[in-house]
Amino acid sequence: MSRYISPVLYVLLMLIGCAAFFSIAGVRVGFIDPHTAFGLLRKTVFAAIALTVLTLASLLVCRRECSAGGRRFFILVAVVSFIYSVMWVGLYTQKSALPDLYDITTDFENPPIFINIAFLRKGSEHDLVYDESWASLQQKHYPNVKPLIVDTPFKQAYIEAIQLVKERGWDLVSQYPNAGVIEATARTPIFGMRNDIVIRLTRQDEFVVVDMRSCSRSGESDHGNNAERIIGFLGELGSRLKPAPIGLASRI
């Protein structure tokens, strides 16, 4: 019986893999909308769980007639499908508690304004008008998203920010050195979804304040990606520049 079951399990495993690849590649290339891709990917996770159970049941039924090679095949299919499902379930569990936010900023009162990015977005994608009602929700879930204040000459801080944008592999859209504005586009690691970024440097007394805003083009939630991007970027930029005195942020 195992020689009949093995090809079926193999085909099912390949179908799950192909469906997962199709959903991820489809979003990256742009011929599938994210909502459809996420729905397909969710179905592959359920299918992988069912395949794990089916494979273990088949191994139990065929344990006497199954050869050593056959048992190894059953175990391999079960392990691969189990790891795949656990990976996505774990990721979903981790992200499910995050709020439905897709626009994160370090300045609620005067968010950095997108200039050229607005011309790159499609009509079906999110607009770039910041919703002030998101501020309290962001402060609750992402309290570490704050401006960076440095005791570094303005020009040097701007050059370092541009350099870091390039090092991170973001697409540099525009730069306005005199205004202290940088616009760029980043892509999420797996699906390659585009998130637009604007960085704003302003002089305040002898210090430089670096604000940043990151906004997804689609989806009701960014699953924390924009907040992580801002915290990571400003944290690394701060390590390259001279920090302002402790406690200054509360006075500026």
Image (cartoon, rainbow, N blue to C red):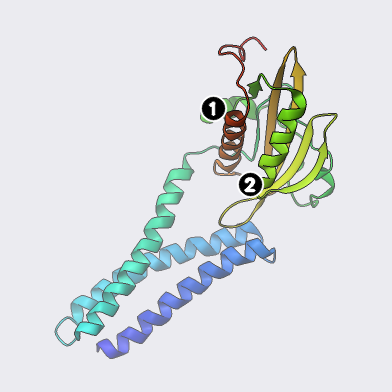
| Quarter holding residue 106 | top right
**Which circle marks residue 41 in the picture?**
none
Q: Nearer the viewer, residue 246 or 81?
A: 246
Where is mark 2, residue-wise?
Answer: 168
Q: Are marks 2 and 1 in contact (CB under 8 Å)?
A: no
Q: Position of residue 216 (x, y in %)?
A: 67, 45
Q: Residue at x 69, y 46 (%)?
A: 166
**Can residue 128 be seen by looking at this rendering?**
no
Element marked by disc 2: loop
Q: Residue at x 43, y 44 (%)?
A: 94
Where is mark 1, residue-wise?
Answer: 144
- Judged left or right of residue 181, residue 227 is left
Q: Nearer the viewer, residue 9 or 21?
A: 21
Q: CA distance from mark 2 to mark 1?
A: 21 Å
Mark 1: few, some, or many residues within 10 Å (few <14, many ≥20)? some
Q: Position of residue 79 (x, y in %)?
A: 31, 67
Q: Quadrant of the C terminus?
A: top right
- Judged left or right of residue 194, residue 100 is left
From the viewer's perspective, is residue 251 above or below residue 124? above
Q: Position of residue 196 (x, y in %)?
A: 71, 44
From the viewer's perspective, is residue 235 above or below residue 8? above
The mark lying in front, picked from 2 and 1, is 2
**Can residue 237 be seen by looking at this rendering?**
yes
Element marked by disc 1: loop
Q: Position of residue 2 (x, y in %)?
A: 26, 87
Mark closer to the chain start, 2 or 1: 1
Q: Residue at x 48, y 64 (%)?
A: 43
Q: Quadrant of the N terminus?
A: bottom left
Looking at this rendering, what residue extends furthest in the top direction? 251
Q: Amino acid at mark 2?
A: Arg
Q: Residue at x 58, y 36 (%)?
A: 227
